[in-house]
Image (cartoon, coloured by chain):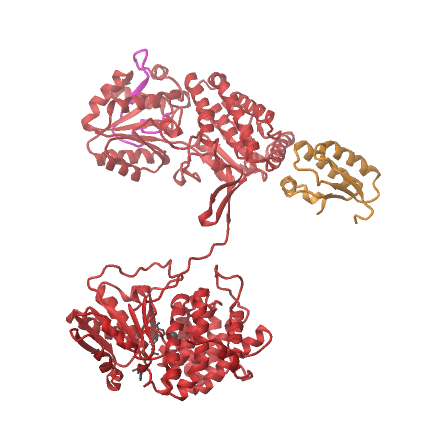
Amino acid sequence: MAETVASLSEERIAYLEGLVSQARTAAAVFTQYTQEDVDRIVKPMVLAGLEQAQYLARLAIEETRLGVVEDKALKNMVATEFVYNYIKDKRTVGAIREFPERGVVEVAEPIGVIFSLTPITNPTSTVLFKCIMAIKTRNAVIFSPHPSAGHCCYEAVRIMYEAAVKHGAPEGVFTCLESQTLQDNAYLMRHKDVGLIDATGGPGMVKAAYSSGKPALGVGPGNTPVYLEKTADLNMAVVDIITSKTFDNGTICASEQTVVIDDEIYDSVLQKFSDLGAHICNEKETELLGRTVIDPKTGYMQPMAVGQKATDIARMVGLSVKPKTKLLIAPIQGVGPEHPLSVEKLFPVLAVYRAKSVNEALTVCVDVNHAGGIGHTAVIFSRNDQIIQKFGEVMNAGRIIVNSPGSIGALGGVYNDMVPTFSFGCGTGGGNSTTDNVNVYNYLNIKRVARRTQAHMWFRVPNQIYFNMNAVENLRHFQSRSTIIITNPAMEQIGHVDTVRRHIPPETHVHVSVIPDAEPEVKVVMQGVEALNFYKADQIIALGGGSVIDAAKIMKLKYESPEADLEELAAPFLDLRKRVIQYPTEKVAQARLIAISTTSGTGSEVTPFAVLTDKEHGRKVTLADYSLSPDVAIVDPQFVMSMPKGLTADTGIDCLTHALEAGVSIFASPYTDSNAMQAIRMVFKFLPIAYEHPQDEEARTMMHNAACIAAIAFSNAAVGVNHALAHAFGARFGVAHGRANALMLPHVIAFNAGVPTKFMPSPNQRGYIAHKKYAMVADLLGLGGQTIDEKVKSLVAATEQLLDRLAIPRSIADLGISKEEFERAMPDLVKIAFDDPSWRSNPRMPLLSELGDLFWSAYRGRSLPTVAKAPQQQIAEEWSCV
Amino acid sequence: MTMNAEWLEIDGERVVQDLQAAREALDSAQNDVVLDFSSVRRIDPSALRAMEKLAGIADEKAVKVVLRGVNVDIYKVLKLVKLTSRFSFLA
Ligand SMILES: NC(=O)c1ccc[n+]([C@@H]2O[C@H](COP(=O)([O-])OP(=O)(O)OC[C@H]3O[C@@H](n4cnc5c(N)ncnc54)[C@H](O)[C@@H]3O)[C@@H](O)[C@H]2O)c1
Ligand SMILES: [Fe+2]
């Protein structure tokens, strides 16, 4: 191809360049036009085309000697009137479609210069159609007609151009090569100013278009199979097939090529064809026909037959047929090179095949479809919806025409509601970029203006939360036949189990299931499920810290939905609302879950999370779903009065971590902020008191409520990277959850307050605000500082001070873990922390290396020297904690 | 740059004629020539041809032609026909 271009003369190149330059200018000027401007031009063009329909049909016949003048005139009318009817109200300039609920507007951008090749078979109708589409979409077109249809196409372009320019189209908007060669086409196809090649025609042209490296709409040949199934309306089918196959002497590439007929109706169908003017060939005639109209060397149809009348073809072949014969029907026994008539025949010769079963019929249709017709058109006549559906599934065709003529059906708008066209996209199977009935949208670059949308948010909490001293009394409201108390040995020893039992209505059968004093494992959960099944429990009371409540949540899940696969439910996800795995909704049993928390930290009594320990792999698995949330939460401080100091400290810091992480989370909302901020204030004020004076009822009450309030915040806003680090570290080194959080906390605040290496996408926030949120916390606590930076520093310092006051070890090294051991664990720690879903809501996306840095900071301890002042008491006092 | 420049207003209704006048002005121009396009809403192919010529003459005479107040639609047309690099623009 490159050589052919090189052989163009300088004059010829100048001529071609002139065409492109004219078109480019017209296209550029066209960009200024409005929708009203183009619509004002299109209508008179359509009228001009209609007026000249017959004239152009005659010209085409004279020049190409193919087809039927009446049909060509009709095609010209379809190409103008039907196409106009479809496009007249379509928006093709500026905003063409709006989706207000999605905040998306589609905006049209013209292509510019289109280089258009038109076929010999539908020369003028294709030109009329493309001109109208081009004006409607503000594009300029350079036409290159088939060499044997140059004159009629030139006339069609002239008629369209004059009408268009008269009504305001830019001069030069259409040009037509008066005579053209392959070299011209090759030159224009590769021209840098040509935006799109629209090639309608033979396979050679389409292939050249696609190989030019330009975007191309190349629509090529077909080989339409027809399945005439026994339930069809046979009279309608036979008339439709004759109408279609003889239309313009069969030149439309969507016309029927092989009709596969069910055995039961085969003879009567052939009789009907014969009655209506078809000649049914005998075996010898079929053989002769195949040999003459199909080139035995190439297997393609002979050009001399294309678009000729049936009687002329009969004469050509030497068949004797009746003078008014419309169609030659040739029975074939298969598809492929041994059956030459099974290929595309753009003339009134139709192959027929007798099929013994539906399966055989469909199989032969697939063969025909694949014998040069992939992606194009297929036709079925049937009243059986299942067979129609199956046909649609197995045919690879852009148009599957049901109970109507293939050629006119595929053109769209006459027999069906498809988009009217003169270019049939054949999809990738046909080497095309589209299966569309090519129309105006294929002549546009459609741009999408997408406005920022706010993610839908939620705020969900269990609908019953009982709090303050003796809230446990509310247990009397809950009727149950069989209740299981899930708890651990400590609760029994302390007497909490008895306290709870006293408040359960006497008629309830109560069984106590004591689970080991450890963070829950699958084995323990499954033992609990056995007990629930054994006692046919309708109520579960979880009495304990986060470990017990989490265990009970998972027991309930497995009890109600035994099929639930915990491993699968713990699958990673990015956004809770879009995740792949769905929690089961079908339940074989049902039990109310009442959570009574005995630590003031996890807030597990209100959260939709449950953490399982996987000892085998040294990791923790987080399950998250609102179906895990307890039905009732009881936040009664009498159960935490017994907490030892270490536990008070660890769980208290877990609560603080929840509130701080929810506060800066990308899912934070005013609903969660109010809870997070309040919880932070309560922790800073009451945790030291509860720690130093365990019997201070007010401090215990406040901390117990703070844990629940913080959990309400993080149930809806989620946590962050602190938890991801703590989960990985805690599981590996057997460090309690709250303590593991504490070791990370000051470092994570400093990390989130810094400028992120990577931002976390967060559509609901305007800019990066984590540092400002921390500064707000500092203000709320009255920590002092003028700038945001100072305030963040005082928050870090105040946190460090709090940890000191609670005598929490201040570094991982302080736990007695050697540097070497920590170093060995580091690759796993980083990997597990990165896989932990907790950080997905963190404002700053942690890089793997940053996770490592954070672990090492926690190993070394103290992030800042203690510089902050003590919290300003009077500001704290102004804020009501109750 | 524009201090000593020669200013010419292009009338939206007579773009081609005014560009013709501008071309003549280039002959005697000592400084930059500023063409004020503020009142031009659209241009057509003949105006584009006139601009192309103008650009050619400006190159020959080494005179800088500055277009002022060109609306973005016209700017895009100039961009598409690759004329933007041949003029300077002033808001
Ligand atoms: N579901 C969630 O939303 C959520 C959130 C954070 C953490 N967690 C998980 O919760 C678990 C930690 O829970 P936790 O911090 O409540 O500790 P915990 O339940 O593991 O209890 C720690 C220890 O304290 C004892 N204890 C509990 N209450 C006591 C009391 N009132 N008096 C004396 N001793 C008492 C327990 O027997 C146990 O030995 C971890 O598995 C963690 O991953 C869950
Ligand atoms: Fe936690």
Q: Please give left or right for residue A248 compared with residue A234 in the image.
A: right
Q: Is residue A773 left or right of residue A523?
A: right
- Location of residue A61 in the rendering, given as x and y in whole percent from the top left corner: 46, 17
* Residue A342 included in the magenta stretch of the image: yes
* Horizontal arrangement in the rendering, residue A476 relative to residue A428 (left or right): left
Q: Nearer the viewer, residue A635 or A725?
A: A635
What percent of the width, then of the height, locates residue A357?
Answer: 20, 33
**Within the magenta stretch, is there residue A788?**
no
Write down the colour of chain A: red
Q: Is residue A84 above or below residue A866?
A: above
Instruction: Say if A806 sits above or below A438 in the image.
Output: below
Which residue shows up at 48% across the image and 28% down it? A129
Range of residues picked out in magenta: A318-345
Q: Taking the image as drawn, is residue A871 in sight?
A: no
In the figure, is residue A65 to the left or right of A533?
Answer: right
Nearer-the-camera pick, A469 or A394: A469
Q: Quadrant of the C terminus of chain A?
A: bottom left
The residue that appears at 48% across and 78% down in the rendered structure is A746
Which quadrant of the structure image shows residue A606? Answer: bottom left
Asked if residue A653 can be seen in this view, the reply is: yes
> In the rendered image, what is the letter of the chain coloured orange?
B
Most prominent secondary structure in the magenta stretch?
A: loop
The image position of residue A576, as x and y in percent, is 37, 61
**Occupied quadrant, residue A623:** bottom left
State which image quarter holds ligand 2. Answer: bottom left
Nearest to the observer: residue A240 or residue A478: A478
Residue at x 46% of width, y 47% of height: A100
Looking at this view, name the residue that lies furthest to the top. Answer: A323
Q: Percent x, y for residue A379?
A: 31, 31
